[in-house]
């Protein structure tokens, strides 16, 4: 392998050929190829990779990327009613201001070599989330809701020493597949049916599937399809009766108006922080949380980091640091970690903390009430359109709702295509993931939507289905 250095950037450390040769000589090697002597020849790429010609300058690279990005349709130029796991909420300017500060601007969770201000910020995020969730312990964020849910199931399985988990049929298929992949091969996920009219979990089906091997049940409230599961207490009692745990996934933006899962028997609560001050990003902006009671059997099963507060040797002074650090895969006994866990979403924990501190309990209540009112207005107005049902399910919903187009003679794909022609992102097409629903779509209305925008959606759908 030739040592060419960097022609245009000779000032990059250790890139000058003479310096590289000195380093090789120190190592007793002849060439860079000697560093990879243990790699079998069959695995080595002998030819140059087939790559486009390099872009020679940062300026030209920026123009190239901006041209690529311009191909995207975005929610600034279009009216958006898509949700399904990543929702368009208003992001207060202070969230972007704080999380872009140099003290915080890293996805990393913080280590002993970090300043303790980040530890305190994450502790305060955890404290405010715990208050919102009515739980004692909240972790530093995981990758997203799907990972938080999968980890919650694994925690419950370890606590109960059981290998079966019950999962509702009506949940996000992509999230289910991630959970199934993460729990495999030793934990089996068993689907539980639902009531066709209300969407509520079928308690008789649940009862028939409870066994001494049941580690617990996972359900979401509000559900993936937007309706509120009203049987949480009965579900928890049935699962507790066989020694299992109740794991509930929750949208935190609903907790200003809905009772927290702890009030109906949840043992572990999880969800996504994205509604709390995070923009929708393609491939980012998601961060999962997990919450439990402050009991050793739960705390010691968290794979992720927990921060606490303790008095120091100086009277009146307090410090912030890891709780039971060795339990994690960062700990001193890395190979004994409960699960591997990354820290790529830690910045969003600080962002959620800023959002919650800004909103306060009254703000979260106002947020929830606003979403509920706009949601109900949208359903009522869509319900007036001939052949369209504003809500497929009879249960009360929050933020999202299933619009039924089966009687229009048109497919969701066709309707969404024509809505896009009106610069409107329609609802998620459910016909593939939930074929029993036929031509239905999941629409999302949040606090950002005005009455005029909802009316524009209704008028556009009316024109499409009546044409």
Image (spheres, helix red, strand yellow):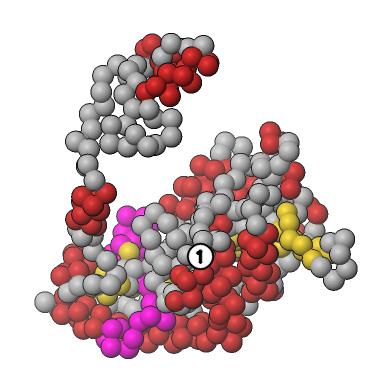
What secondary structure is marked by label 1?
A: loop
Where's the C terminus, which quadrant?
bottom left
Q: Is residue 91 magenta?
A: no
Front position in the image: 80 or 225: 80
Horizontal side of 299 relative to 75 (left or right) equals: right
Q: Residue at x 69, y 45 (%)?
A: 328
Q: Quadrant of residue 313?
A: bottom right
Q: Residue at x 33, y 64 (%)?
A: 428
Q: Residue at x 48, y 51 (%)?
A: 176
Q: Is residue 446 magenta?
A: yes
Q: Quadrant of residue 70?
A: bottom left
Where's the N terminus, which quadrant?
top left
Horizontal side of 462 relative to 361 (left or right) equals: left
Q: Give the answer, above or below, for where 222 lies relative to 109.
A: below
Are there few (<14), some (14-19), or many (20+) residues within 10 Å of tag 1? few
Q: Give the answer, above or below, for where 426 lies relative to 102.
A: below
The number of numbered discs placed on residues in the rendered structure image is 1
Q: Give the answer, above or below, for where 315 lies relative to 22.
A: below
Q: Give the answer, above or below, for where 219 lies relative to 48.
A: below
Residue 449: where, in percent of width, then height?
35, 82
Residue 203: where, in percent of width, then height?
60, 64
Q: Which residue is mark 1?
A: 101
The residues colored magenta run 429-455
């Amino acid at each position: 392998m030739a040592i060419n250095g960097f022609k245009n950037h000779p000032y990059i450390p250790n890139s000058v050929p003479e310096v590289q040769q000195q380093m090789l000589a120190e190592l007793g090697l002849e060439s860079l190829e000697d560093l990879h002597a243990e790699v079998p020849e069959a695995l080595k790429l002998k030819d140059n990779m087939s790559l486009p010609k390099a872009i020679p300058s940062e300026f030209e690279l920026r123009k190239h990327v901006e041209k690529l990005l311009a191909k995207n349709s975005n929610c600034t130029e279009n009216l958006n009613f898509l949700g399904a796991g990543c929702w368009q909420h208003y992001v207060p300017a202070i969230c972007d201001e704080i999380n872009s500060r140099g003290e915080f601007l890293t996805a990393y969770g913080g280590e002993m070599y970090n300043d303790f201000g980040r530890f305190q910020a994450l502790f305060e995020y955890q404290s405010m989330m715990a208050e919102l969730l009515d739980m004692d312990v909240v972790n530093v964020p995981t990758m997203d809701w799907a990972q938080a849910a999968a980890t919650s199931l694994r925690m419950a399985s370890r606590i109960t020493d059981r290998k079966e988990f019950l999962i509702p049929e009506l949940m996000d298929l992509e999230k289910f597949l991630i959970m199934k992949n993460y729990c495999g091969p030793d934990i089996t996920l068993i689907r539980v049916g639902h009531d066709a009219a209300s969407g509520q979990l079928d308690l008789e089906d649940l009862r028939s599937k409870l066994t001494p091997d049941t580690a617990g049940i996972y359900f979401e409230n509000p559900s993936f399809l937007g309706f509120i599961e009203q049987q949480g207490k009965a579900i928890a009692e049935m699962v507790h009766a066989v020694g299992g745990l109740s794991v509930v996934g929750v949208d935190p933006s609903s907790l200003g108006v809905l009772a927290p899962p702890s009030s109906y028997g949840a043992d572990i609560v999880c969800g996504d922080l994205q509604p709390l001050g995070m923009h929708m990003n393609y491939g980012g902006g998601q961060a999962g949380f997990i919450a439990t009671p402050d009991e050793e059997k739960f705390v010691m099963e968290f794979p992720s980091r927990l921060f606490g507060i303790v008095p120091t040797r100086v009277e009146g002074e307090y410090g912030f640091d890891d709780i039971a650090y060795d339990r994690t895969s960062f700990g001193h006994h890395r190979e004994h970690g409960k699960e591997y866990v990354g820290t790529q979403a830690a910045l969003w924990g600080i962002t959620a903390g800023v959002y919650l501190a800004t909103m306060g309990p009254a703000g979260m209540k106002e947020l929830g009430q606003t979403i509920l009112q706009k949601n109900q207005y949208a359903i009522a107005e869509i319900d007036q359109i001939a052949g369209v049902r504003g809500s497929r399910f009879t249960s009360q919903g929050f933020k999202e709702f299933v619009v039924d187009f089966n009687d229009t003679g048109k497919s969701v794909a066709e309707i969404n295509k024509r809505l896009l022609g009106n610069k409107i992102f329609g609802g998620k097409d459910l016909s593939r993931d939930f074929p029993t629903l036929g031509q239905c779509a999941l629409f999302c209305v949040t606090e950002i939507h005005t009455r005029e925008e909802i009316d524009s959606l209704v008028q556009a759908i009316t024109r499409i289905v009546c044409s």
